[in-house]
Image: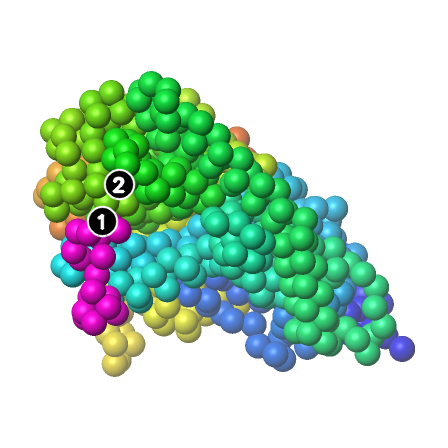
Amino acid sequence: MTSPADPPNGAGASGPGLKLLAVTACPTGIAHTYMAAEKLAQAAESLGHGMKVETQGSIGAENVLSDNDVREADGIIIAADKDVDRSRFVGKRVLVVGVADGIHRPQRLIEQVLGAPVYEGDGSGAGRGGASGAAASGGGRNGGGGSKGRSVTYKALMNGVSYMIPFVVVGGLLIAVSLALGGDTTSKGIVIPDDSFWKTVNDIGSIGFELMIPALSGYIAYAIADRPALVPGMVGGWIAAHGELYDSEAGAGFIGAIVTGFLAGYLVLWIKRVKVPKFVQPIMPIIVIPIVATSALGLFFIYVLGEPISWVFEQLTDWLGGLTGTSAAVLGIILGLMIAFDMGGPVNKTAFLFGAGLVSKNPEVMGACAAAIPVPPLGQGLATLLRRRMFDDQERETGLAALFMGFFGITEGAIPFAAARPARVIPANMVGGAVAGAIAGVASVEDNVPHGGPIVAVLGAVGGVPMFFVAVVVGTAVTALVTIGLMSVGGGAAGSSAGAVGAAGVVGAASAAGAAGAAGGGSGAPSVAAEPVLAGVGGGDRTGEASGAADARKAVAPQGVAAETGEVEAVPTGQVLSGYLTEQTVKERLAADGKDAAIREMAELLAATGKVTDTAELVRAAFAREDQGTTGLGEEIAIPHAKTDAVTAPVVGFARSPEGIEWGAPDGTKARLVFMIAVPEADAGEEHLRILALLSRKLMAAEFRERLLGAGDVAGILGVLGEIE
């Protein structure tokens, strides 16, 4: 009997008539997604096979694979650098690779797909696409390529951070607002009366903060091992945050959450590989795995890791108690280092509780703590303002929230930055905290309530207010500058392929196709899971028609198509791509010989249209996008782009570089064809994304690229580009 995973009539990979499916997706969901789709469709056609390709781009999933498609398929290729749901492919041969392989090795993938392992669901070890593809599906040995081992860890960490950010922002801001509007300064700190409306607001914010750590842990685990890992990850994070479960006055904080997240994820992966009878397989992902993993992880943390954590907390408290007779500067440095180390974790709480316990006897100790408490969030927020291009949109917006939280003494506002780049952010926070603590200690700054941040000075609880603010300002500046310095030296800008190495041994790497950043929007979306979307939109019309080689170039009609009659209106002379690209924005030859200079030159080209109000800001936005991942697509193509209010309407430019410009493309080719797209924030819609998809697909044809390079003048270039419409 023929297996449903096997092709009919014994057809091989080189035989005619195979029905193949593919799913393509990249972190940004723009060019690489559609380039891979086009290459796979072309390769299938050349080999005599049929292929339908589902693209999961920024405008949503297009050409979605139906149940009938899957049922009849001989093999499925997932070329993706982000998570792709594979539950619909149970019983089929599934080859999981990076999106770059779909672009550069499509024929080889088609030849390999019939030798790929049969996906049998979450309970039997095939895992999931994207983040855990290499570890769980065997994609690495089937042409996965790339540095999957490193990127899995980085993507998992970024996934957890991006899901955690909304909890930090919502919880922190609600607490800050409630303290500002409803708090009273007392000997026990800033207290909100129990019968006050603002007490309820504060409680809601506190719930958000309590869920922050489980969310971080849970979604790290989820990115590694899919849904069965979510519960053990979240429960493990909750245990890490609640020290009372293992006799500790302070929990393990966000560092503990990172540890439990990775432990849960890899524990679930290990359990998935255990061979079980077939009748047990259906209940593995929903009953067996979550129960076993949650119990094992919870008991391990409470009985094995919990006792050392509690012991460390006690030793730190005793050690600090013996330092009260030392110089104020030394004690201030130590307290500042501890406050800034884990931002609400056990080390931070040890220092805080030590200072709070001496408020009535020695308020100078709490004064040093109060000065150090706001430094991490204020410093990270300031860094996002000083060097905006080092941070993606989400981080810049989180930075503004961190500034607000820092003012109210909420150190946890810096946790998203520390979790994303622990090796750079934590040392910077500690240096700034130590400086602030030392200055406050030397100046004998007093804090008469167990709370920190500028808010306590504003409410009159601080003695020595001028030096208190000096300590806070200097510490904040030091943290910001050290953060920027470490990111510059270590390549830690958003999406950098150097990545972040942290307390959990985390090593980050951008995907082989580049561009692993985070989406815009202060509420946060998955980092690695986080997608730096050109237009900042998603969803919308999902009826795009890109099935098979014959249909791969179809898309929803752009501007100029009559909605009711379907008749195409004439495109004005000298304008293509719906009028976004005109004679004014075409240049036969770039003078620049480097990427940065080319981007500046292209920005000046776009400025000639009158649609650019601030050329320098457009350049900065384009540089920031490059920091998230190269826009060099390979095949001698680069498409730098920016979403910024420095332009008043969408505009596209094109220029050629006969010698080529080094753009960091995955295939190592220099960019000879350079397109630049700029879109205003408010007007960012779907149409230009569809045009970009069409452009990416068209550029995959070598003959089209050759004609574009060989066009004699601007009119000739526009004539070639006009074929896209």
Q: Which mark is residue 187?
A: 1
Q: Could you tell whether 132 is left or right of 186 in the image?
A: right
- Residue, far right: 1
Q: Earlier in the sequence, mark 1 or mark 2?
A: 1
> How packed is label 2: few (under 14 Cα within 10 Å), some, or many (20 or more)?
some
Could you tell me which residue is drawn at 17 percent across and 51 percent down? 185
Residue 321 makes an appearance in the image: yes
Q: Which mark is residue 158?
A: none
Residue at mark 2: 360
Could you tell me which residue is drawn at 16 percent across and 26 percent down? 467
- Please report the bounds of the magenta region as a residue range: 183-200
The answer to which of 631 and 660 lies nearer the viewer is: 631
Are the two marked residues, 1 and 2, in contact with CB atoms closer than 8 angstroms? Answer: yes
Q: Amino acid at mark 1?
A: Ser
Mark 1 vs mark 2, CA separation in Å: 8 Å
Image spot of residue 538 (x, y percent): 36, 63
Q: Quadrant of residue 418?
A: top left
Q: Amino acid at mark 2?
A: Ser
Could you tell me which residue is drawn at 26 percent across and 57 percent down? 175
The answer to which of 668 and 468 lies nearer the viewer is: 468
Image spot of residue 548 (x, y percent): 56, 65
The answer to which of 583 and 166 lies nearer the viewer is: 166
Assess whether residue 577 is covered by the magenta stretch: no
Quadrant holding the N terminus? bottom right
Residue 395 makes an appearance in the image: no
Q: Could you tell whether 434 is left or right of 2 in the image?
A: left
